[in-house]
Amino acid sequence: MTDRKTTELLGIPFDHLSGEAICERIAEAAARKDRLWISTANLDWVVLARANEDFRRTLMNSDLVTCDGAPVMILSRLAGKPLPHRVTGVEIFERLMAGEGGALRIGFFGAENDEAVRASEALNRSETPLIGAGGYNPGHGSVDDLSADRHIEALNAMEADMLVLALGAVKAQAWIERNLDRLNAPVLAHLGAVVRHVSGDTVPAPKILSRTGFEWAYRAVKEPAVRSRYLSNFAALPGLTLAALGERRDA
């Protein structure tokens, strides 16, 4: 492994890796069975990390943190610490589906109803090198409930190279931190939108919107459930802007 290069922005260490380099890391971790906990920090995660010390700790303890969102890129420039790459969770998975990580076994954990199972089945019907290792929905419950032996055993039985979670950011990060050493999947990431996209329950934003950083607007139109979260996050932007400018002043 090469030395990790990061930029700390608003208390979060963002890695300097491109999407291509991240896929290389995933392939390497899967082949060597090395632990790789990936956190994709968008504006919502930045807001959560500033309000929730336990959540921020999970980002600090992650092996790789990506800048997942145009607002975070803008904040990095305001802080005088421009991040070199913006890499979303959806982009990472699309690159993996295109073959940039090789033939990986992907397990899905969480989501609603049978989305995780359908995501795995959809991978196995697709013309990609990715293999659906299975989907498992433990139902709703606390981190303690979802850490029961029967759940861990079901996930380990998949023998996945990468476990993709959809439990909600705070719960997923806490669950990974709690169970990191009990799981045999070397690569772990909470990518809730990916599970819904792969299962066919939602459609990714058009490429032009993704490239220009406006995929959030597409999701706000298509997914009413995210609207209140977006409004809350944008309400936090003035405070984050002042904090970023403060980091520039103190540099």
Image (cartoon, helix red, strand yellow):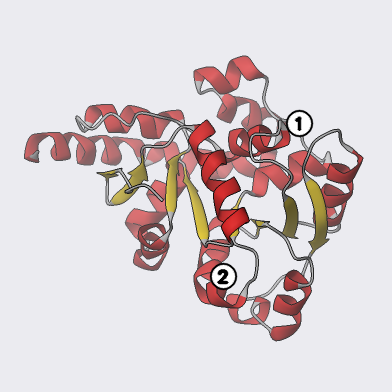
Q: Is residue 196 above or below residue 63?
A: above
Q: Is residue 30 visible?
A: yes
Q: Classify 23 as above or below 53.
A: above
View extreme (left): residue: 250
Q: Is residue 236 left or right of residue 35?
A: left
Q: What secondary structure is marked by label 2?
A: helix
Provide the residue designation for mark 1.
Answer: 203
Q: Is residue 145 left or right of residue 1?
A: right
Q: Which residue is mark 2?
A: 175
Residue 3 numbered tag: none
**Callout 2 amino acid:** Trp
Amino acid carrying label 1: it is: Val
Q: Is residue 58 left or right of residue 37?
A: left
Between the C-alphas of marks 2 and 1, the distance is: 27 Å
Mark before the other along the chain sequence, 2 or 1: 2
Q: Residues within 10 Å of mark 1 (few under 14, many from 20)?
A: some
Residue 189 in sight: no
Of residues 21 and 48, the one drawn nearer to the viewer in this rendering: 21
